[in-house]
Amino acid sequence: MKVLITNIRQLLQVRDNPVEKVSGSDMKSLPVLENAFLLIEGDRIADYGKMEDLPDMETDKVIDATGKVVLPAWCDSHTHIVYAGNREQEFVDRINGLTYEEIANRGGGILNSAKKLQDTPEEDLYEQSAKRLEEVIALGTGAVEIKSGYGLTPDAELKMLRVVKKLKENYGIPVKATFLGAHAIPEAYKSDRKGYTDLIINTMIPAVAQEGLAEYVDVFCEKGYFTTEETENILEAGKAFGLIPKIHVNQFHAIGGVQTGVKYNALSVDHLEVMRDEDIEALKGSDTMPVALPSCSYFLSIPYTPARQMIDAGLPLALATDYNPGSTPSGNMNFVVATACIKMKMTPEEAINAATINGAYAMGLAATHGSISKDKKANLIITKKVPGYAYLPYAFGSNHIEHVMINGKVCHTN
Ligand code: NIG
Ligand code: FE
């Protein structure tokens, strides 16, 4: 099957020589072809160029993209979309003055979701999660990472990861699985933290690895959750089973999690709402991708990741949604990109780089996703008619997507 997209107003993120990530001042340049064509063969990008150079060819289908922008589908490297039920009561409680921390201390928060998930049969959990995955694909997400962490018992954590595995099998986009047993200390281990980390290390990680259910290991390294020492022990145990670290750090407090991530060569360190100079320093020269989650900052009214300071210091940055029932009940990467521009002062070029190629890097997919390059997967967004790509984050509340293509096929049309 050959599909040709013609008359594209702007074809974004065109990389003849693919890069694995972009950092610092390079993030300001987004390679764009104006008045372009894009040829797809099967599930891959076969060719692209200017319309005036379009060769004569036979195709099975032509899509006219006059006035439209085409770009790689979003790469959302941090989500928790496998969860049961919702937590809108906590949302209302926060409006009425409670903090996220106070709600968690009363047994709400992550523990509230864990209770619901433990009581939900796997089939039901799958149905709820599949609906969310379909929702985010329709919003232009073409690759996604999904974490466990709302189980907090060996059985419930495995149940979550089996649901992730089923999503991976049943949907066409790449789905990367992360084991996040260290998301919170469960009620039953409140006075025996060591008992819970031992359970993670000695029971959960070996079981997850044995079933081949995850490629990454995550820890919520934060005051009231897991210390840097506990984080190190868990990452060490994960690494022994081939799980690559990818961790939650610096959401509310800077307690050294960034340094722990760099020390263990984490693929990414995520959140970073509270960053000290030494945390930025620690990331310099490392292979660890910093990931910002602006919808979480928006929803919880906490600081935004200091993107300007980080990029100006030469670091790369990725953007992701953090879609979860507590801190970010939204999986809309279009909103993430707009919020990064509006609240974090990232330019549209920086934000699009962060949400495509750098997001792909943060889930080990940079060789196959995240840019318009020959042989990469044809996971694409075709917008409606827009004046140009800066209009996408500018007109932030509207859905500008006309088609989402996954593996070379249109799978959603607005
Ligand atoms: O990434 N910070 C830790 N975990 C999630 C939120 C957990 C929840 O409130 O359910 C996050 O924000
Ligand atoms: Fe998260």
Image (cartoon, helix red, strand yellow):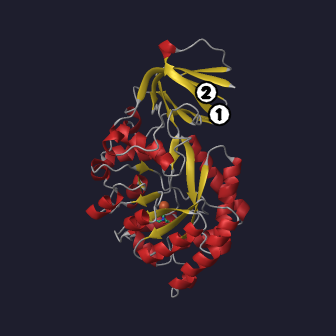
Residue 318 image offset from top left, x and y in percent: 42, 49
Whether residue 95 is visible, yes or no, is no
Is residue 405 visible in the rendered structure shown here?
yes
Residue ID for mark 1: 43
Q: Residue at x 35, y 54 (%)?
A: 285
From the top left corner, tell me how far across and down residue 396 is, in percent: 40, 40
- Residue at (50, 14) in percent of width and height: 53
Residue at image mark 2: 40
Q: Secondary structure at mark 2?
A: strand
Which amino acid, mark 1? Asp
Residue type (three-letter) at the residue carrying disc 2? Ile
Mark 2 touches mark 1? (CB < 8 Å): yes
Q: Quadrant of residue 228?
A: bottom left
Compared to residue 153, the image places residue 380 above or below, namely above
Query: Which quadrant, please, contains the N terminus?
Result: top right
Nearer-the-camera pick, 370 or 332: 370
User: How many neighbours does mark 2 have within 10 angstroms: few (below 14), some (14-19), or many (20 or more)?
Assistant: many
